[in-house]
Amino acid sequence: MKTKTLIISIFLSGTILLSSASNTIAAKRTLWLNKCASCHDGKTAPAAESLVKKYKTVEDFTEAVQTKGHKGMNILKSSIPLLKKIAQELGIKDSQGK
């Protein structure tokens, strides 16, 4: 799904400029950067590197979020596909048997 952003600039002269910003860096950022990285900085919550070391498979990661995750992560707990995508973005591997 592509996201399109419309930027409206109004100059002091009264000129209105409309431009599309659908191909900006923000539109292409990963789920981890958009949703997780601000808290998972190593101070507030564990950093990405420590999560990758701790959870060896996507299944371990998703189970931990669902059972042990902080209440700030409640919005993700019911969305296994999003959790799996975030785990894959971090570099956590799928289990060998699947």
Image (tube, rainbow, N blue to C red):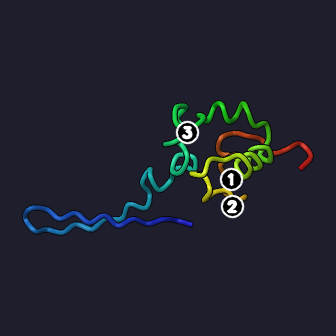
Q: CA distance from mark 3 to mark 2?
A: 19 Å
Tag 3–tag 2 contact (CB < 8 Å): no
- In the rendering, at what x and y percent does residue 33 appear? 52, 46
Along the line of sight, which residue is nearer the eye, 49 or 71? 71
Q: Secondary structure at mark 2?
A: loop
**Where is residue 76, by image quadrant?**
bottom right
Q: Is the residue 89 above or below the residue 76 in the image?
A: above
Identify the amino acid type marked 3.
His
**Residue 88's x, y, as percent?**
70, 46
Residue at 75%, 37% (x, y): give it.
55
The vertical placement of 29 against 1, above or below, is: above
Does label 3 or label 2 sit earlier along the sequence? Answer: 3
Q: Are marks 2 and 1 in contact (CB under 8 Å)?
A: yes
Q: Residue at x 10, y 68 (%)?
A: 14
What residue is at 18 percent from the left and 69 percent from the top? 16
Q: Which residue is mark 2?
A: 79
Whether 42 is drawn above or below 19: the answer is above
